[in-house]
Image: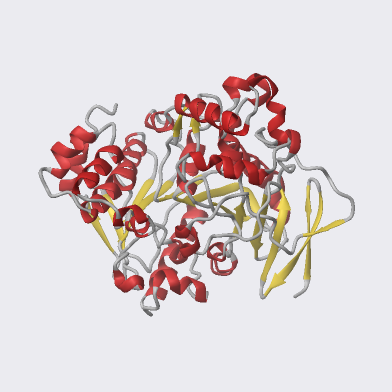
Amino acid sequence: MSEILAKTRFGMVQGSREGEICVWKGIPYAAPPIHSLRFRPPQEPDSWAGVRAAKEFGPAPVQSESPAMKFLGDSPANKDEDCLYLNIWSPGADHKRRPVMVWIHGGSFMYGSGSSHLYDGKSFAEQGDVVIVTINYRLGVFGFLHLSDIGGEAYQGSGNCGLLDQVAALKWVKENIEDFGGDPHNVTIFGESAGAVSVGNLLSMPNAKGLFHKAILQSGTARCKVAVEKANEMTEQLLSELQVDHNDLSALEKIPAETILQAIKIFPRTAFGPVGAGITISPQPEKVLEEGFASDIPVIVGTNMDESLLFTQFDPIWEQLDQRKVKTMFELSFQPFWKNVSQYVLQDRELSKTLYEEVMTHYVFTIPAIFFSESQAKHGAPVWMYRFDYESKVFNGKLKAFHALEIPFVWNNLVNSETEKMTGNDPHRYKLAEQMQHAWIAFAHHGDPNIAKLPDWPKYDLEDRSTMLFNTKNKVVNDPDRQNRLKWEQVFQNRK
């Protein structure tokens, strides 16, 4: 492999060549968020003299283990608080100004990294003449501990450091990507799950405006994960657990990361995430988008047919529930809309795990994606909607079209042997992966996902509600699952 040099504002980096593609790994886009920078917004990295090697991925963010993420192949071994690095795949460091695609990984804002084998950008760069960037950002307590109300100005934005990391990475791309063969004026952000929620939130953030020009949201839309009142309550609990005085928050800088990870076990596994404090993001970013803030941004938005089956598969609680506890699970999961969900959606059907999976998929993923598409379409924004229906054959097919299954198809990384653990080995999947990736590539180039290999894919509007259904045979259906959509509109009838 020959060595590749490129220039950043902070110094030269040396990557490597993999076939026809140039790859740079582990480039710092911000200073290490350690010591006095822990729980603070990201700062610019220091410059360096000479040439910095960029041939190995940087550490992933500090995080605990997740069985679901391990199954998905995104359970990193090398983890550290010093994690703010990005990776680039490009056909060449030649100033050719190719479209840039910046990937934001998922993982409930608690897990994952930008260096999983799922996100190898070589196929994208080869097939699409695009520049791919993957990033790390701070996760869990390190990315989303809300200290602003206790610590004041010194900790402004602390509850959303993970999102501010993403903004810092996009600023780095804008300032440096041209030397890597990318066009800073043609940047598409895309992400899945928490990555898609991040994309949605970035669409609503004034300080991200102008840093990207198109967006793709895979199984997630704009929302705050934690209300500011709950965030403050969690902060109080954690400070008490760590025996840190309110008047000496600097003590948090000295506590080992592993000790903090142990301390947050008093909370649910996925407790931390974007905080609606009104500082970095609005308390209701989805409302900002409903008012047309991102109407100038073309978007693709979609979900998978059976999202929730991934979560119930790796949640042992379902093996312990009797019928009474199942009812409690439903009531807790669908608050504050339980009464409406029960009346309009469940309609006296027997409560079961299967029904829970179906209803939760709509509640968390399908209906928010429809509402987001509606709000974009109302303002004349170009929006295309899809549903991923391909069913995996793993676990005897019982996971169906589960959450995150579309990722190796979008990235066209099916040849990786690890990926078969997610997708199965049906040979028909290769054609679908090629079609999906080329649609994403077309969108990055032209702001329109239509390609010759797919049926005509109309923009989403409130009359036809055209939706591409991705499967071994792709088709466009107007207003798929209309009856369910109408039921859920009754559930959320007062949402505005």
Query: Which coloring applies here?
Result: secondary structure
> In the picture, residue 92 is in which quadrant?
bottom right
Q: Nearer the viewer, residue 89 or 490?
A: 490
> In the picture, residue 372 is in which quadrant?
top left
Question: Disc count in the image?
Answer: 0
State left or right for residue 198 relative to residue 372.
right
* Residue at 46% across, 66% down: 408
* Residue 460 percent location from the top left of the image: 31, 47
* Residue 36 percent location from the top left of the image: 75, 33
Q: Nearer the viewer, residue 340 or 12?
A: 340
* Residue 262 percent location from the top left of the image: 58, 44
The answer to whether any part of residue 162 appears in the image is no
* Residue at 41% across, 46% down: 220
State left or right for residue 440 relative to residue 168.
left
Q: Quadrant of the C terminus?
A: top left
Image height of 1 relative to 305, above or below: below
Image height of 73 relative to 286, above or below: below
